[in-house]
Amino acid sequence: MLNLKGGIKLKVFCKKTISLVTAVGICMGGGDSVPALANDEGLSMYDGGFVEQDYPGFVIAGGTLMMYTGTDTDVVIPPTVTSIISDVFKDNTDIISVTFPASVKSIGSGAFSGCSSLETVIFESDSELETIGDNAFKGCSKLKSITIPEGVIEIGTGAFSSEGDFFREINLPSTIETLGDNISDVFSNSTSLKN
């Protein structure tokens, strides 16, 4: 527990050590007048919303995964997440697999870009996923195949580009409406892709 000026108490729930400036910036969202930064229910203020504390290593505000501070190699996104912002896992070379709950509706640009150890991506049944952002899985060079769930309507430019020699198969849903600027941009430099 950190005591801040004005009697504000700050609870920091992270696996990794972060600076006070970072912690306050996370909890205050850059603002300067948040009435309470933490309470005893395991929730902290984040830019006018609450950050859930039930899932160590995940900073979740209003259903949006804002940051990941964990060290797991097999990442299971919490079931309260509905969207993942850009670059959350970018260049995390420890992740081998990621499992998305049915609740996730959007994966932001570059969310898993550069996760060069990522081999497996799992979407739970009855997935509500609709969009995969630009470069979302770019450079995941150990990814071999992926099945995009029914319901996805848009996959951004470069979403599966530069996947390397292992990436051989992607199964697209019948619901797809938009594949980047053009289909070849979505998969550019994924030289071994078969279908």
Image (spheres, grey):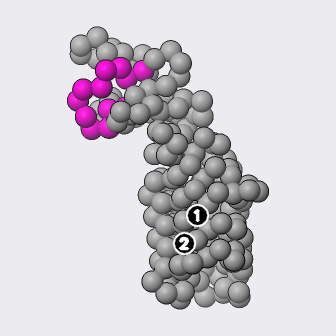
Question: Which of the 4 image quadrants contains residue 97?
Answer: bottom right
Q: Is residue 111 visible?
A: yes
Figure quadrant of the C terminus = bottom right
Question: Which of the 4 image quadrants contains residue 175?
Answer: bottom right
Name the residue rendered at 52%, 42% in the picture: 63
> Mark 2, residues whose alpha carbon is within 10 Å: few (<14), some, or many (≥20)?
some
Magenta residues, start to end: 27-38
Which secondary structure type mostly characterizes the magenta part of the structure?
Answer: loop
Which residue is label 1 attached to? 130
In this view, 187 is above or below 110: below
> Mark 1, residues whose alpha carbon is within 10 Å: few (<14), some, or many (≥20)?
some
User: Rounded to the nearest whole Å, what is the CA distance between mark 2 and mark 1?
Assistant: 7 Å
| Label 1 element class | loop
Q: Is residue 37 magenta?
A: yes
Left or right of residue 1: residue 52:
right
Figure quadrant of the N terminus = top left
Q: Which mark is residue 27?
A: none
Which residue is label 2 attached to? 154
Q: Is residue 119 visible?
A: no
Query: Where residue 4 appears, x then y in whole percent?
Result: 29, 17
Query: Where residue 135 appears, x then y in whole percent?
Result: 48, 70
Amino acid at pointer 1: Glu
Name the residue rendered at 34%, 36% in the picture: 47
Query: Where residue 165 appears, x then y in whole percent?
Result: 65, 82
Label 2 vs 1, first from the N-terminus: 1
Query: Where residue 189 appears, x then y in whole percent?
Result: 54, 85
Left or right of residue 99: residue 25:
left
